[in-house]
Image: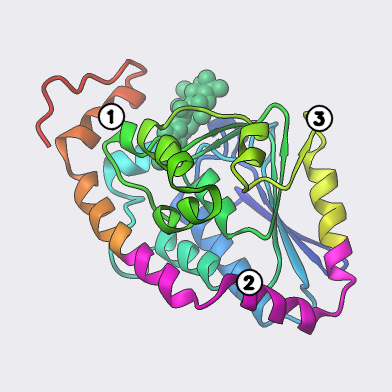
């Protein structure tokens, strides 16, 4: 268990709160493990009819802990590492998943949204998928889901340029349902979760399954991405990007070969 994921229940709604605000809720292996267990557990728990993922401290999550990337502790290589379990739990989750995004959402903080059924983002949200900037490739089946949801050109822009974008752009890109004033995302997400939890649960589950289709496609893409991601983690480009972040300096790719 970890103190950095708070798991609570409100009626039939499970709330997963990331509570590592001093590090912008950057995700560690222990946090991935707690999230995966909670999501997998909810699949077979009749008491849970919807799950809300939210952050704390005005922040959703800055993605994978870069210190763990640099040390290899958070590498999404083969096998059942916590991050792999978490990504699979997203791809195979059978009940409504709702996200409340305030402030920073980076990397998997954005790519997990493509597995959510309802996404609320506050006006102050700063979303970014900077995998290329870090010498990496996309994960969480985002290379499959993002073009499908947002169209090829927008997905290319977000995944190749890795620039920051806002809640309104997320809505225009089709993966944000509602934009709220800053500080208001969680209340709207909880309201949506309560509403869906009051509906007939089997009809909801079957409808989600029909909408999402066979998880095998998403799991296969995650595996393909994971192999490349693991290779890229050891690349000179990624090493330079991780060092630059940890040393608080701009990255210099002029000398890093592959
Ligand atoms: N991994 C580890 N630590 C992180 C982190 C991450 N992904 N994101 C932020 N932190 C830490 C910072 O190192 C800093 O720690 P310190 O106070 O001990 O120095 C603290 O969280 C606050 O972050 P800071 O950068 O000062 O906040 P900011 O508001 O200026 O910027 C971000 C926020 C998210 C834009 C910036 O921290 C960032 O770019 N983080 C990296 C995001 C990323 O690339 N994630 C991986 C995606 S694959």
How far, Cα to Cα, is label 2 from label 3? Answer: 29 Å
| Mark 2 or mark 1: whose residue is earlier in sequence | 2
Span highlighted in magenta in the image: 195-223
Asked if residue 52 lies left or right of residue 253, the reply is right
Q: Where is residue 58 in the image (x, y as percent from the top left)?
A: 70, 31
| Mark 3 or mark 1: whose residue is earlier in sequence | 3
Per the image, the residue denoted by label 1 is 241
**Residue 211 among those drawn in magenta:** yes
Front residue (pair 180, 18): 180
Q: Nearer the viewer, mark 3 or mark 1?
A: 3
- Residue at 57 percent across and 69 percent down: it is 37
Per the image, the residue denoted by label 3 is 181
Helix, strand or loop at mark 1: helix
Residue count near mark 1 (Cα–Cα under 10 Å), binned few <14, some 14–19, many ≥20: many
Per the image, the residue denoted by label 2 is 211
- Residue at 33 percent across and 31 percent down: it is 133
* Figure disc tally: 3
């Amino acid at each position: 268990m970890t103190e950095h994921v708070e798991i609570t229940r409100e009626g039939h709604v499970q709330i997963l709160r990331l509570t590592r605000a001093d590090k912008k809720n950057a995700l560690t292996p222990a946090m991935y493990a707690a999230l995966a267990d909670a999501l997998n557990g909810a699949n077979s728990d009749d008491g849970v009819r919807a799950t809300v993922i939210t952050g704390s401290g005005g922040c959703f999550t800055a993605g994978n802990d870069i210190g763990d990337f640099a040390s290899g502790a958070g590498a999404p290589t083969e096998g059942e590492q916590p991050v792999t379990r978490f990504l699979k739990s997203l791809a195979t989750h059978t009940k409504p998943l709702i996200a409340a995004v305030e402030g920073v959402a980076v990397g998997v903080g954005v790519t997990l949204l493509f597995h959510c059924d309802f996404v609320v983002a506050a006006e102050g949200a700063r979303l970014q998928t900077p995998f290329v900037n870090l010498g990496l490739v996309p994960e969480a089946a985002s290379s499959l889901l993002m073009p499908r949801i947002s169209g090829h050109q927008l997905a290319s822009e977000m995944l190749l340029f890795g620039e920051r974008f806002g809640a309104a752009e997320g809505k225009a890109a089709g993966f944000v349902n509602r934009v709220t004033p800053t500080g208001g995302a969680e209340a709207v997400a909880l309201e949506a979760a309560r509403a869906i939890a009051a509906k007939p649960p089997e009809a909801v589950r079957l409808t989600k399954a029909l909408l999402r289709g066979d998880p095998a496609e998403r799991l296969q893409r995650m595996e393909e991405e994971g192999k490349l991601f693991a290779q890229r983690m050891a690349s000179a480009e990624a090493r330079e990007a991780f060092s630059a972040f940890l040393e608080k300096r701009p990255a210099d790719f002029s000398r890093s070969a592959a």
